[in-house]
């Protein structure tokens, strides 16, 4: 029986809401962003064709370079601390312990992830307050964490870790639970010690999960915006300004639409390259 | 003999770490319940003295809290219901129906997963301005009705449901609508729940998009409202801000304690973070 033309209709009908919305809110804006990046426009006057001016400005603008460096520092530190400590936590919880202890530890580390960044950033601003904050009281310090050019970015990395570790922890724990106990048993019979069992059994079996968590953590960290806007406004002196925050400032505060579009393309290209790179590298070490 | 001791020690370290993790949240709630005059004392009062609700009563005097909560809820519900519906329809077509271009269209959608919203926001803002939709809740939920990840995720889920069931229904002359809503979706419920929780939570906590599109207090969602309250405080008591934050945070934490299993499953199965 040859498929009839009318048999195709339900298929197109079913995908049409998603596809139409996709064209209007993803595909068209993507094309438009490329177009806008070639113009000077303040939303009010007539757009003025600028060729590659915005991209030339991109590589000479010190604030952009600073924002790109900050974002990379933030994202790389984020991946290392999330995956590293997240793995230790998952291993720590994936043992024999009383149900109550396990429940408490899992819940406590997961809780902050449920809280909106807006609330997290506001509470931590008070925790970090130099005079009446908890941080300085318990650390016996007098540092003004968010106003210090040295400490502001590392502080935001710590706050981001606190907020998001619950995600990494749960993903890694779920991966750890898929490691078959028989494999461990077999390795034990062969005389492998705990460290060697981790290295030769746990890690290879978990590599797809670790890979996945790394990609998601990196992409999420690269789009960081909320804590900078709420806690430091990118300061002091641009020390915590991220790419997305700079895009926001250019697009919605000084209305340099073309420049903002060019900046957002930088973000897009980096995410594409990193995702591609991670998939390529993963072939060497991920056992799928 | 040594192993159990080391295990207990590790338990202790983890529990202390857990206490440290929730300390800022506990401090938030205790401070919100304190008399303004005792609120920010050092050393911090971990055991709350006679709690007071006066800070909570002051919240509506500074921001239209109920309206903001309603906006947040409305946006999250519309976004979740809409995104689940468009995703389920498309996922069914991509996994069960045949039509020319099916796999190509799906590949294009999949490729769009690397397009960040921070790229599309500038053109969409211009579009919304042109449609006079800036500073309305429509500008928040309308673009969120399509969820590429949702399509991908549900397609995988539906693909794991045996085809014999819908083939039997087709024999009986059932329409695709009937099959999707009566056969497939009931079987895909765990997947729908996981996706639904994820979409709802992401919408409820979203700051970036509403911060750009909403400017009048009565249009704002709670996260943007909280940040605006901080700006409007001036010399006002910070405890009122803490009370407002508590009102936003506490319901989510309580919901989590009740539906913990579904929440965790949502993350473990979708694999996404908001």
Image (cartoon, coloured by chain):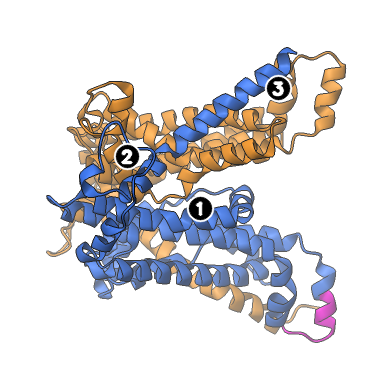
Query: Is there any visible trace of residue A237 in the rendered image?
Result: yes
Q: Give the label on residue A124, or none.
A: 2
Query: Is there any visible trace of residue A39 in the rendered image?
Result: no
Horizontal and vertical percent for residue B123?
31, 61
Horizontal and vertical percent for residue A119?
35, 49
Element type at mark 3: helix
- The chain letter for the residue carrying disc 2 is A
Q: Would you say residue B174 sits in the magenta stretch?
A: yes
**A231 shown above or below A138:** below
Cα separation between marks 1 and 2: 32 Å
Direction bottom: furthest residue: B173
Residue range of the region highlighted in magenta in the rendering: B167-175
Horizontal and vertical percent for residue B97?
71, 72
Residue beneath disc 1: B113
- The chain letter for the residue carrying disc 3 is A
- At a point 38% along the width and 38% down the height, the residue shown is B46
Q: Residues within 10 Å of mark 1 (few under 14, many from 20)?
A: some
| Chain B tint as drawn | blue
Cα separation between marks 3 and 2: 36 Å
Chain in orange (letter): A
């Amino acid at each position: 029986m040859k498929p009839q033309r009318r048999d195709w209709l339900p298929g197109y009908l079913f995908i049409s809401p998603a596809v139409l919305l996709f064209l209007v809110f993803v595909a068209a804006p993507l094309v438009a962003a490329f177009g806008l990046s070639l113009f000077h426009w303040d939303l009010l006057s007539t757009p003025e064709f600028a060729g590659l001016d915005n991209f030339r400005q991109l590589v000479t603008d010190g604030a952009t370079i600073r924002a790109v460096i900050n974002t990379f520092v933030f994202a790389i530190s984020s991946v290392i601390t999330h995956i590293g400590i997240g793995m230790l936590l998952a291993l720590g919880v994936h043992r024999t312990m009383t149900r109550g202890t396990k429940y408490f530890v899992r819940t406590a580390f997961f809780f902050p992830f449920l809280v909106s960044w807006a609330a997290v950033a506001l509470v931590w601003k008070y925790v970090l307050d130099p005079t009446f904050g908890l941080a300085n009281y318990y650390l016996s310090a007098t540092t003004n964490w968010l106003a210090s050019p040295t400490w502001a970015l590392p502080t935001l990395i710590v706050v981001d870790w606190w907020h998001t570790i619950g995600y990494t922890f749960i993903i890694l724990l779920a991966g750890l639970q898929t490691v078959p106990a028989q494999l461990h048993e077999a390795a034990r019979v062969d005389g492998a010690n705990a460290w060697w069992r981790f290295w030769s059994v746990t890690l290879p079996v978990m590599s797809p999960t670790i890979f996945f968590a790394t990609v998601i953590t990196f992409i999420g960290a690269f789009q960081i915006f909320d804590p900078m806007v709420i806690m430091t406004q990118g300061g002091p002196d641009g020390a915590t300004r991220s790419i997305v925050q700079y895009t926001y400032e250019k697009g919605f505060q000084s209305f340099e639409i073309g420049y903002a579009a060019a900046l957002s393309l930088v973000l897009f290209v980096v995410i594409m390259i990193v995702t591609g790179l991670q998939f390529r590298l993963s072939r060497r070490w991920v056992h799928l | 003999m040594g192993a159990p001791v080391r295990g207990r020690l590790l338990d202790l370290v983890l529990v202390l770490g857990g206490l440290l993790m929730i300390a800022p949240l506990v401090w938030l709630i205790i401070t919100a319940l304190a008399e303004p005059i005792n609120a920010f004392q050092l050393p911090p009062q971990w055991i709350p003295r006679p709690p007071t609700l006066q800070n909570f009563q002051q919240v509506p005097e500074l921001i239209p809290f109920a309206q903001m909560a309603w906006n947040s809820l409305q946006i999250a519900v519309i976004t979740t219901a809409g995104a689940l519906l468009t995703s389920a329809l498309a996922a069914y077509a991509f996994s069960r129906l045949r039509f020319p271009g099916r796999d190509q269209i799906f590949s294009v959608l999949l490729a769009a997963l690397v397009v960040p919203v921070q790229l599309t926001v500038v053109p969409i803002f211009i579009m919304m301005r042109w449609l006079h939709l800036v500073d309305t809740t429509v500008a928040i939920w309308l673009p969120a009705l399509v969820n590429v990840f949702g399509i991908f995720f549900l397609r995988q889920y539906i693909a794991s449901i045996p085809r014999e069931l819908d083939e039997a229904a087709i024999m009986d002359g059932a329409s695709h609508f009937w099959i999707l809503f009566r056969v497939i979706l009931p079987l895909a419920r765990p997947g729908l729940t996981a996706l639904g929780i994820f979409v709802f939570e992401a919408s409820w906590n979203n700051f970036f998009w509403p911060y750009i599109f909403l400017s009048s207090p009565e249009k704002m969602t709670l996260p943007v409202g909280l940040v605006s309250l901080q700006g409007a405080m001036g010399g006002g008591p910070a405890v009122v801000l803490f009370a407002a934050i508590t009102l936003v945070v506490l319901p989510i934490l309580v919901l989590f304690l009740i539906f913990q299993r579904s929440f965790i499953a949502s993350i473990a199965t979708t694999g996404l973070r908001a």
